[in-house]
Image (spheres, helix red, strand yellow):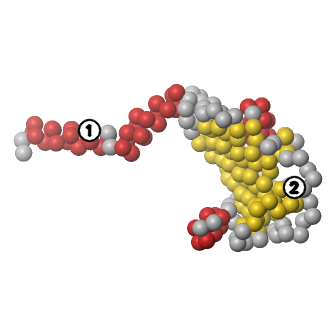
Amino acid sequence: MNNAGQTHSIAMRTACSIWSPPAFRRWVLLPGLLLLGLVAPVFAITMANDPHGYHDLRWGMPLTDMSELLVTRENTHTTDYTFRDRPPMYADIPVDSVLLSTVDAQFARVTIRYSGAQAHKQVLQYLERTYGVIERLPGQMMRGLNQQYTWRGPDTEISLTYEANRDRGFIFIESRNLAPRFQDRMSDTAE
């Protein structure tokens, strides 16, 4: 093959690889969406103060005999609870719901739902003040239709997702050791 043929062959392989679906998403689509503010990057930091649970509830403990909790859903491997006579709050911030979950009778996850931009701002400030500030690099955008933040400690992972178009947020506080069992148990029993 002559020089012109080799150059043409290399150019065609490069063009095909640049425009392949994964490369297209990585090099063209994702930066465009980030610039438009439709997708916000996921921010993850190492947690400053691992809570090892939620309030005075430690990961792995059974919740079955706690009178202040009410069972809301129960199946073979998982049980969900809410607080019986307490309005849903997180860090003194009114929220829509607080759900405590066990897997194989071991406390493993808290799911918190909230609504509104003001609640989101308060929740994010609390999480940064308590578990570590999200590093904001020059030029990064901290808003968008979906925002995701994660704090990882040795025992606990806290994930915050805020959907601006629906004006709602979700906080998952999970045991890093026990939370994977939810997926394992669901796939084992198709629950």
In the displayed structure, would residue 82 be above or below residue 104? above
The residue pinned by badge 2 equals 83
Residue 105 location, x and y as percent?
77, 71
In front: 107, or 75? 75
Near mark 1 (Cα within 10 A), the count class, few <14, some 14-19 or many ≥20, is few
The residue pinned by badge 1 equals 15
Left or right of 181 on screen, residue 99: right
Kindly identify the amino acid type of the residue bearing the numbered disc 1. Ala
Left or right of 4 on screen, residue 153: right
Near mark 2 (Cα within 10 A), the count class, few <14, some 14-19 or many ≥20, is some
Residue 183 placement: quadrant: bottom right
Q: Earlier in the sequence, mark 2 or mark 1?
A: 1
Residue 121 placement: quadrant: top right
In the current view of this chain or complex, which residue is farthest to the left? 2
In the displayed structure, would residue 20 be above or below residue 64? above
Residue 51 location, x and y as percent?
79, 55
**Residue at image point 77% right, 31% down:** 118
Q: Is residue 134 visible?
A: no
Badge 2 marks a residue whose secondary structure is: strand
Badge 1 marks a residue whose secondary structure is: helix
**Residue at image point 70% right, 72% down:** 76
Figure quadrant of the C terminus? bottom right
Figure quadrant of the N terminus? top left
Residue 80 location, x and y as percent?
77, 61
**Residue at image point 66% right, 64% down:** 182
Residue 28 placement: quadrant: top left
**Mark 2 or 1, closer to the camera:** 2
